[in-house]
Image: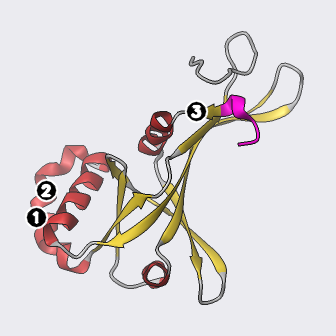
Amino acid sequence: MRKANREMSEEWALDIFDKAPYITVSMVDTKDSMPYAVPLSLARIGKDFYFHCALEGKKNDILKVNANVCLIAVTKCKPLVSPNNAFTLEFKSATAFGVVEFLEDRNEKIVGLKAICERFLPHHMHSFEQAIERSLDRTAVYRIRLTQKATGKRKQYGKDGKELEYGKME
């Protein structure tokens, strides 16, 4: 990381992933050597991330050939003019690299889907079993296992107008 004073801990980075409304998952389409990125609603259990999608589509085709992905999340973006009159942006971001696994075991798929539902619709878990019965067999569920520790970075100014250094929270 070029500016080490902005680097944050792995725990902090994982928390950013948990708070982001979506996470951009980037992959490489080896068919045409082009990058491909999609914003997805991921949920995390430990250091594993889960997402779901249709059983067919470009994302599925790419992941069958190359399962390596990069995850990016950004929160708290706020453009501002810094104390020294520079146009800048406050932000909190996290990056992680992993390998995607297509889940075939029914119980593993349910674990992933439950995590997603608990994260995004916790007040509707009473409908979870019905949704599983209706759509599990036509839903692809993937797990992303991290291959490196997640990294976090932030640019934030304190009340005194100075950029916060590593480890200082406000």
For marks 1 and 2, give the CA distance.
Answer: 6 Å
Amino acid carrying mark 1 in the image: Gln
Q: Can residue 76 be seen in this view?
A: no
Who is closer to the viewer here, 77 or 154? 154
Determine the CA span between mark 1 and mark 3.
41 Å
Task: Give the image quarter of residue 35.
Answer: bottom right
Q: Is residue 111 visible in this depiction of the protein?
A: yes
Q: Which mark is residue 8?
A: 3
- Image: magenta residue range: 1-6
- Mark 2 = which residue? 127
Q: In terms of sequence position, does the residue under pointer 1 or pointer 3 come before the other?
A: 3
Q: Position of residue 66 (x, y in %)?
A: 50, 79
Q: Position of residue 163 (x, y in %)?
A: 73, 21
Q: In this view, does 165 lie above or below 63?
A: above
- Dot 2 alpha-carbon crowd within 10 angstroms: few under 14, some 14 to 19, many 20 or more: few
Residue at left offset 29%, top offset 54%: 116
Which amino acid is tagged 3? Met
Q: Which residue is drawn at 20% across and 58% down?
A: 111
Write down the residue under mark 1: 130
Q: Which residue is drawn at 34% across and 78% down?
A: 54
Mark 1 and mark 2 residues within 8 Å of each other at the beta carbon: yes
Image side of residue 114 versus residue 74, left or right: left
Residue farthest to the bottom, as pictured: 31
C-alpha separation, residue under disc 2 versus residue under disc 3? 38 Å
| SS under mark 1 | helix
- Depth-wise, is mark 2 or mark 3 nearer the camera? 3
